[in-house]
Image (spheres, grey):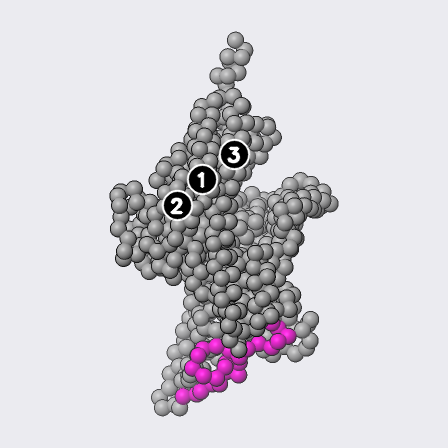
């Protein structure tokens, strides 16, 4: 029943979209002034200066789309399995006809733009300046019909001629076409319920993604209200609305283009994807850190502090470790992990030994880590002698406490009266602070010069050694001979990269299955080979692509490796099993032989280690524009990791996917701020906050969808009347 409601709802929404919303955009200019197209051939030019293009086949697109959508609506009322066949056929027709119509628009726009480029180059070649490389520009002109426009523009610039102000910029699909795609894909997906095994697989998928997907959709819907309230429809001063339909189309285009900018800026180009992955990399680490804690029943909110300690350890190792690259680089990565692990182990030990709440401890330790970072990179390290004496005293007292805790007799004595021992140390500390801090004479301040701090007023360290740097991923890609500057023109085998991604995702998904390792590897390999073959048939083995400058570095691959490690550790080792057992039921786990104290310390240590590895991205990978530790280290990623873990259902694969979504939104937020004056990156922050809120509310979904047991009962109740009728 739920699938039929979904099909009818989406199909009706798509029909309304065709009636009132723009189907495509011919041009999107600066300030989000757009020229849009409504089916079949109605243009609304909010720019008041875009030349309209004749586009073939739009009447056919409208007729076939309406037929397919109406079939989807009426076939939903068919109770037999035949409706699934109609869904598949209608969805396939809708998918193909929408793609065909958009390709016609794309081809018309490309023809117009290529013609204009050809005219401009020919005009320049008639009377070339000295700065023009005539032979190179002639090559560009000869290949203009078979070369992507972005590559043509770049190669023309290399030849000394800059092509400016091409029309029909940022053309693409509109809200109506997007809704048609959603209807088509949903119909095709649900049509596989025709097969009994397919129905079971689809139900499992829907149950898994129900809460995250509904939370994302609700957050986007709530944000849509804010966007429409804040942002007026951008139009040229010469444009005048001709009626309510134009006004409605303008409002829908404003909302659609805001979300289109948010997502397409990150997904429509190699540079956008690279920037999104750059934002995603630290979120994978912090999301895994929080998720691992949640699995063990602990709330590690101290990822920001663990990030700082990992960065400090990585910076010190990167500056001072001697040796060749193959020794220094792994040790520096290990130092980042050790720094975070050390800062995570402290609240874990306090929780295991004294029952101290890990939430309070990790929050307080975030402040300590921030103060430590400020202390180390401060421009003026001037101290009163009394303050230094207090620091030395507290350090000595801490060392004594650690030594006493390692001696069996004293450790046993303190364990018997833990609270009394802690109180005694606190009293001694207070007396010592007062005694060492008191002075009846004027003392000269003491100035320290930190050897690792870079000179100047900017709070940052020196740049780490070359042997400790993680390379940028773009540096490992070969460039063509005509590449200049930071941009590269490459023939990329996208089929290979996507096949590798399919192999990794398939392997992660299969790790939970009760299969032998060789069966999992073989299945993932077959999926990867099939993906490669399909993409090769579509021509993705050699695509000429412009690669812009990016700070995406090898830390991204480390983050993926960390996700695979967590997946294997948590679901395929004895220690991981104990951690997952201690989380939901600590008493039962202890009864089964698991040590709660050891697992508490282990989980917080591993969680801190993962958070500390963010230093590989920010310090070793140069994501902050420099290979150095800066006071502007974005520790907010530690808190964002909580939302990433919740959205990813505390699973490694879910964390990777949700981190990528967050990376898309963070990168898209920058473009959104540039496109719309009234919309800032705070809109993205609001969306992310709403996602967490709706996840906490389980997406406002009924318990029959969330709880598999109740879902089974509902299905059983639906089936019983049919069984009784058949019996009669």
Specify whether residue 465 is in view. Answer: yes
For disc 1, the marked residue is: 58
Q: Nearer the viewer, mark 3 or mark 2?
A: 2
The image quadrant that residue 406 belongs to is: bottom right
The residue tagged 2 is: 37
Q: Circles 3 and 2: CB distance less than 8 Å?
A: no
Q: Secondary structure at mark 2?
A: strand
| Relative to 34, residue 157 above or below | below
The residue labelled by disc 3 is 93
Secondary structure mostly taken by the magenta-highlighted segment of the chain: loop
Mark 1 / mark 3, whichever is N-terminal: 1
- Label 1: state its secondary structure: helix
Residue 116: image x %, image y %?
47, 59
Mark 3 or mark 2, earlier in chain: 2
Mark 3–mark 2 distance (CA, rounded to whole Å)? 21 Å
Which of the pair 674/22 is nearer the observer? 22
- On the picture, is 633 further left or further right than 49? right
Q: Gap in Å between the C-alphas at discs 1 and 3?
A: 15 Å
User: Which portion, as a residue range, is magenta?
Assistant: 445-471
Residue 642 visible in image: no
Q: Are marks 1 and 3 in contact (CB under 8 Å)?
A: no
Q: Could you tell whether 15 is left or right of 480 in the image?
A: left
């Amino acid at each position: 029943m739920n699938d039929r409601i979904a099909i009818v709802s989406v199909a009706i929404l798509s029909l309304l979209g065709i009636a009132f919303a723009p189907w495509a955009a011919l041009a999107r200019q600066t300030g989000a002034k757009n020229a849009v197209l409504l089916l079949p051939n109605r243009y609304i030019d909010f720019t008041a200066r875009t030349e309209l293009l004749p586009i073939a086949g739009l009447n056919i697109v409208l007729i076939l789309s309406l037929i397919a959508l109406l079939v989807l609506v009426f076939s939903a009322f068919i109770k037999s399995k035949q409706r699934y066949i109609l869904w598949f056929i209608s969805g396939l027709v809708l998918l193909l006809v929408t793609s065909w119509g958009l390709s016609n628009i794309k081809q018309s726009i490309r023809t117009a733009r290529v013609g204009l480029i050809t005219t401009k180059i020919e005009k320049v070649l008639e009377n070339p300046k000295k700065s023009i490389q005539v032979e190179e520009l002639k090559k560009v002109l000869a290949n203009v019909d078979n070369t992507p426009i972005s590559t043509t523009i770049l190669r023309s610039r290399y030849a000394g001629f800059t092509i400016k102000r091409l029309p029909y910029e940022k053309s693409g699909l509109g809200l109506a076409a997007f809704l048609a795609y959603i209807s088509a894909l949903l119909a095709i997906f649900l049509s596989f319920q025709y097969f009994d095994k397919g129905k079971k697989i689809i139900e499992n998928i829907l149950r898994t993604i129900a809460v995250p997907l509904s939370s994302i959709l609700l957050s986007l819907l709530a944000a849509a209200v804010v966007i429409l309230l804040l942002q007026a429809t951008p139009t040229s001063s010469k444009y005048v609305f001709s009626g309510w339909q134009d006004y409605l189309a303008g409002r829908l285009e404003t909302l659609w283009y805001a979300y289109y900018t948010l997502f397409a800026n990150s997904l429509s180009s190699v540079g956008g994807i690279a920037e999104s992955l750059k934002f995603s990399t630290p979120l994978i680490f912090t999301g895994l850190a929080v998720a691992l804690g949640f699995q063990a029943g602990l709330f590690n909110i101290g990822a920001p502090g663990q990030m700082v300690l990992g960065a400090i350890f990585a910076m010190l190792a990167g500056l001072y470790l001697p040796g060749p690259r193959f020794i220094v680089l792994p040790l520096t990565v290990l130092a980042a992990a050790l720094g975070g692990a050390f800062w995570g182990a402290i609240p874990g030990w306090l929780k295991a030994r004294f029952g101290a709440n890990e939430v309070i401890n990790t929050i307080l330790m975030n402040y300590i880590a921030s103060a430590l970072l400020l202390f180390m990179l401060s421009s003026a390290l001037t101290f009163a002698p009394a303050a230094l004496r207090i620091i030395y005293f507290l350090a000595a007292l801490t060392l004594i406490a650690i030594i006493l805790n390692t001696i069996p007799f004293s450790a046993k004595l303190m364990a018997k009266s833990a609270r009394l021992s802690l109180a005694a140390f606190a009293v001694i500390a207070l007396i010592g602070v007062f005694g060492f801090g008191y002075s009846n004479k004027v003392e000269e301040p003491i100035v320290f010069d930190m050897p690792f701090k870079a000179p100047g007023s900017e709070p940052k360290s020196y740049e780490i050694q070359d042997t400790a740097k993680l390379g940028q991923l773009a540096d490992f890609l070969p460039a063509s001979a005509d590449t200049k500057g930071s941009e590269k023109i490459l023939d990329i085998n996208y089929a290979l990269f996507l096949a590798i991604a399919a192999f990794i995702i398939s392997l992660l998904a299969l790790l939970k299955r009760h299969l032998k390792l060789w069966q999992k590897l073989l299945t993932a390999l077959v999926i990867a080979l099939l993906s490669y073959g399909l993409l090769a048939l579509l021509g993705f083995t050699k695509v000429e692509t412009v690669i812009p400058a990016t700070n995406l570095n090898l830390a991204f691959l480390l983050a993926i490796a960390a996700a695979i490690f967590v997946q294997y550790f948590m679901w395929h080792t004895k220690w991981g099993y104990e951690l997952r057992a201690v989380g939901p039921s600590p008493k039962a786990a202890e009864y089964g032989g698991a040590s709660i104290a050891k697992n508490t310390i282990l989980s917080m240590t591993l969680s801190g280690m993962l958070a500390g590895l963010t230093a590989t991205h920010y310090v070793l990978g140069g994501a902050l524009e420099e290979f150095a530790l800066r006071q502007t280290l974005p520790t907010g990623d530690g808190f964002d990791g909580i939302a990433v873990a919740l959205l990813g259902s505390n699973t490694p694969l879910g964390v990777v996917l949700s981190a990528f979504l967050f990376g898309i939104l963070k990168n898209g937020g920058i473009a959104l701020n540039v496109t719309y004056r009234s919309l800032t990156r705070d809109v993205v922050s609001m969306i992310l906050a709403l996602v967490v809120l709706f996840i906490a509310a389980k997406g406002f979904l009924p318990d029959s969808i969330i709880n598999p047991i109740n879902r089974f009962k509902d299905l059983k109740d639906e089936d019983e009347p049919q069984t009784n009728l058949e019996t009669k």
